[in-house]
Amino acid sequence: MEYTQLGRTGLKVSRLVLGTMNFGQFTNEADSHTILDAALDAGINFVDTANVYGFGANKGRTEEVLGTWFAKGGDRRDKVVLATKVYANMAPDGPPAWPNHDKLSALNIRRAVDASLKRLQTDHIDLYQFHHIDRDTPVEEIWQAIDTLIQQGKILYAGSSNFAGWKIAQTNETARRLGSYGLVSEQCLYNLVERRAEMEVIPAAQEYGLGVIPWSPLGGGLLGGAIRKEREGGTTPRTSGGRAVAGLADPAVRAQVQAYEDLLDKHGVDPGEAALAWLLTRPGVTGPIVGPRTIEQLESALRAVEVKLSEEVLSSLDEIFPGPGPAPEAFAW
């Protein structure tokens, strides 16, 4: 496994991030623990979750699965850089609910971090991420709450997720003015199909020293051999009725994906592994989030670290999936 610094911090993290959104939802607890053990054995030390994962009546369940894994003992918790998120409504009966059960008020941040620590069965969270922009709460209030948690030893670093470039700048400029350390990472939608983050989000992250953690690196399944699986009759929760099916229904997208799969067949590279390997070449990227439901999917993701894409393949990928270009030039007519 390769490691890198998380943004401007001294924290070393693996170049693959283990996403856990499927744990407790599509993958039972025993299998989730097996995947976690295998990931740790392979050198993955960066584990990402969120308080809302499990969703619906089961929100919080994924953190509980991680908590029971940590509770098995050994050096699991000491080896893991643990990231979770705050924002979603966590009221037991779900929205609509009582006020102050969501977003980024100081009250909800305090309530949410204590609840996450209990579910995770740990005394601290290494990276506490804002899952979404809160347009109602002043940034000053958010940093006051975060700095208190850092002083209490409940969290070490703060990160963002799904932030626009301007929001990264505003949040870190406010932190600088208040003497706070600021955001150290941004978790954003970024893959070969969806490259708009290159316009403003990634440049802002690089300017402020944030590590970029792409989510949905396979484009909801589109980049994982979707057409081949369709042809072979294979189905997954995403290819059977999710984003991959919706994407392939668009003739332009289908043509891109077909050209992508043909290119990789020519070079003998698995599509899913190539999509991850491409992200590992991108400026500013710490590591993509992989969310395996099975050991086999984890093993495929691990192989991506060893895949070295040639300049010829990288150039061809840019031709198939052209990026938007930098802002403001990309906005020009």
Image: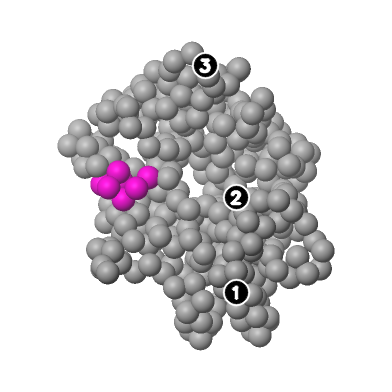
Q: Amino acid at mark 1?
A: Ala
Can you say which quadrant of the picture contains the N terminus?
Answer: bottom right
Residue on which disc 2 sits: 18
Residue 76 relative to residue 318: left or right: right
Residue 47: give its label: none
Foreground disc of the pair 2, 3 = 3
Residue 8: in sight, yes or no?
no
Residue on which disc 3 sits: 97
Query: In the rendering, at what x and y percent does residue 168 appear?
Result: 30, 46
Magenta span: chief secondary structure? helix
Report the span colored magenta. Answer: 163-169
Residue 255: give its label: 1
Mark 2 and mark 3: Cα distance apart in space: 32 Å
Q: Amino acid at mark 2?
A: Leu
Looking at the image, tell me whether mark 1 or mark 3 is earlier in sequence order.
Answer: 3
Relative to the observer, which residue lies in front, 323 or 331?
Answer: 331
- Which element is circle 1 on? helix
Quadrant in which residue 32 is drawn = top right
Query: In the rendering, at what x and y percent does residue 193 appear?
Result: 52, 64
Can you say which quadrant of the picture contains the C terminus?
Answer: bottom left
Mark 1 and mark 2: Cα distance apart in space: 31 Å
Residue 309: in sight, yes or no?
yes
- Which element is circle 2 on? strand
Query: In the rendering, at what x and y percent does residue 299 appear?
Result: 71, 61
Mark 1 and mark 3: Cα distance apart in space: 45 Å
Q: Amino acid at mark 3?
A: Ala
Query: In the rendering, at what x and y percent does residue 306 appear?
Result: 60, 71
165 in magenta: yes
307 in magenta: no
Foreground disc of the pair 1, 2 = 1
